[in-house]
Amino acid sequence: MPDVDYRALVSRADLIYHSPVETPLEGQPIGNGVMGTMVWTVPNAVCLQVNRCDIFAVDKYHEGRQGEATDYCGGCAKVTVDLGGQPFQGGETFAQRLSLYDAECTIEGEDVRIRCLISSAADALVLEVDDRRAHPQPVRVAVSMWRPPEVQTGDHRARYRFGNAGDRVLLVQQFDQRDHYCASGVAAAIVGHHTRVEETAEGMRTLVSPAHKGKRTLLITSAASWSRREDVGDTALSLLDQASPQPYDVLHREHARWWSNFWSRTFVHLTSSDGGAELMERARTLHLYNMAATSRGTFPPKWNGSLFITDGDVRHWGAQFWIWTTEMHYCPLFAADAVDLTKPYFDMYLQQLPDCEKAGLQRWGVQGAFYPETTPFDGPVILPGDVAKEFQDVYLGRKNNLRLSKDARALGQYDSSLRVLAGSETELAAGRYTWISHVASSGCELAVQAWWRYRYTGDTEWLRSHAYPLLKGTVEFYRNLVEKGEDGRYHIHGTNVHEDFWGATDGIMDLAAIRGTAPLAIRAAEILGVDDELRLQWQELLDELAPYPMGSDPESKALTGGVLADDVWAAGHLGHVDGQHNPEDVWLNPIFPFEDWTLETGDPPVDKIVQKTLDLAPRMQSILSGESCNTAIRTPIAWVRAGRGEELPAILKSYYAAFAPLTNGWSLFEGADQAHSIEHLGCISTALQEGLLQSVSARPGGPEIIRVFPAWPESWDASFRLLARGGFLVTSAIQQGEVEFVEIESRLGEPCRLRNPWGVPCRVGEIDGTEQELDGDILRFNTEKDRRYRVLPANRPEPRSTR
């Protein structure tokens, strides 16, 4: 069995810089899931920007326009720690290292050493300065705002003010517009040293500590509030008081304990002769680090910049959430046994459910939950009745977008899914279609992930409170949106096949969404013992649903770009708009995320369609040929789900290169400053884990079958511990294409189904317990909760421990 040195393994992905970064975005990110900053240097100082996940300048009813001056979130304060002289000018003395295992950044300069972290126990940044220079200099800690103390935009007011805090600095920020109020407080202190506060410039206060040889500790705390009655500054100062008596090393130990426990949950260790496997292992480690550093608060991290923006309020693409870009951050977390990090993601979208049900009625005229692809943090806007009627007329093609009234246009300027209709000064395609306007499948993507969480954890209460409401709402939306045709089949008209094809009929993404979620809704209702009548209606929807469009269909051929070949799935039938817009390999959605086909399906004609579609998928082919990518397509995951292991090294290498990642792994593939993202790392991590371990059903909602190394190249050796659905923690290893062992810990006590990795009779038994011999393609055995089981070929001795 692997004897894992987690510190050594995780440290293989540490960020190690031997020269100062050229731009702040190349800095090193630290965070505790709520509060975060990028850490970078200039010759005389360490630079920080305090950001939080729960600070939003405006809510969904903001009257400004998306992307304009008030569309920002997260930023709280700039902090500069000036040590005097130029200790960080570079050269042989400079080194900056982010220890992922400890979530601690260390900077070495000329006789100066900095250590810093953001505590996992409190919203406090702790920074230790060790000045070993022969002539130490004063430490100057500047806390600054980046906009004037008061900015009025219509009835929206953004205010900054410094509070009275004695020998500490307190900066309070407030946003106020009608019912929306949000505030942040940032407090800073230098612990244990005489300090004075200087008003060095307008909008800046500086803590000054006299020259001192040796160590001193700086604390920066932050807090947020959504209540006008709460003094957020007092909260930030209180956090300073709580942390101040404790030395850096004490705070570090408590902080490092959380991270050590996090890293010990699972592992992936890869080796290859060319270093390609190690690079992908590093990408996964970086992704898990960034998610643990950003996703433990009230809201999920923004995909564009997360907790690590560096230029004040600037955040390209603004403060709203895209489901597509957000969901991929979370896909790898289930198998990585980091399900707790998904809480802010699911909580935010569940809180939007009532308004999404209203949006389904107002915009589409049907019951059920319509999750627009993009929304503000608090969900879609609820419109007055007359304005709702206007937007519905545009959605359904009864009215041209240019005929929206002045009132409708005014109310549709911020909510992104309305702005794409109301904000255009020119006629949209067919008077109503654009990139995200008619994407109907996004809610089902959320619902499928919610089901995954249930199956990984077995948490029936969570199924009742989160997963089933999402499944029920999104399936009901589709059930009421489809129309029965003359052929007796249910068809769907006038929806987008994501951003790729607009206004299609029987788009493959919608049909896959229905086939991928309706069975889950039925199974969830059975488990919970609810909605007998709806179950029958959902089953009837599935039974009578139109088949996937094929390339040979005349209606498919009429849609330019939608056909790859006659004998594979097509993107859809031509509806209201011809042509392709943002190539995303949408033909593969039945494979992932909707799992209407898996390696367990066992349907030879469909198997053939899947494999040929993968070979023809044009966007992935362009990436394999060396093109860059401006959207994180999911094609690598589909390749792995289809068992294409020998191609995995080339696929992941090309995919990684297509995003031109910065030194810290983040990418600017969205095409703008302050829109850096790790979405590509999420896709790589998911593909990598799915190559090592899959736990999927033959059909959605059915019992899962575990496969180890279902899509793994013979040239990559690997060992791993990952979580499978059904609550099975699986450990295995492979060398030169030979699986060495399988060990399974059963958390829930469910029956285990393991696809036989050797194809010979096997012995299965509790570790240090009784054994039984099993044979066949699938090894089935009962388990007991919290017991561990080992599976080996019947004629193979017990493996020795490895490190």
Image: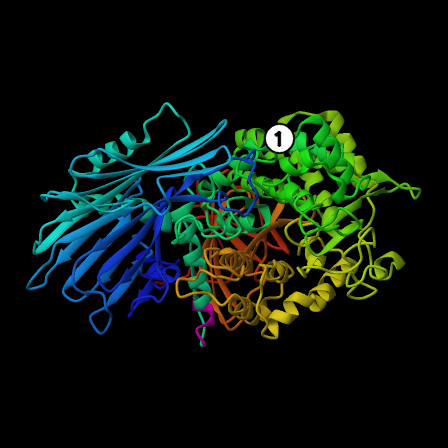
* Residue 676 or residue 167, whichever sits in front: 167
Q: Circle 1 sits in a helix, a strand or a loop, which is it?
A: helix
- Identify the colour scheme used: rainbow
Q: Does the magenta stretch include residue 27?
A: no
The residue lying at 15 percent from left, 48 percent from top is: 208
Q: Which amino acid does label 1 sit on?
A: Asp
Which one is in front, 204 or 208? 204
* Left or right of residue 400, residue 645 in this image: left
Q: Where is residue 660 in the image (x, y as percent from the top left)?
A: 49, 68
Report the residue at 74% width, 66% height from top. Answer: 612
Highlighted range, magenta: 274-278
Vertical order, 715 against 739 (above or below)? below
Q: In what quadrant of the picture does the N terminus appear? A: bottom left
The residue lying at 16 percent from left, 63 percent from top is: 85
- Is residue 275 found inside the magenta-colored segment of the image? yes
Crowdedness of circle 1 by 10 Å Cα count: few (<14), some, many (20+)?
some
Magenta stretch, main secondary structure, is helix
Q: Can residue 642 be seen in this view?
A: yes
Residue highlighted by disc 1:
355
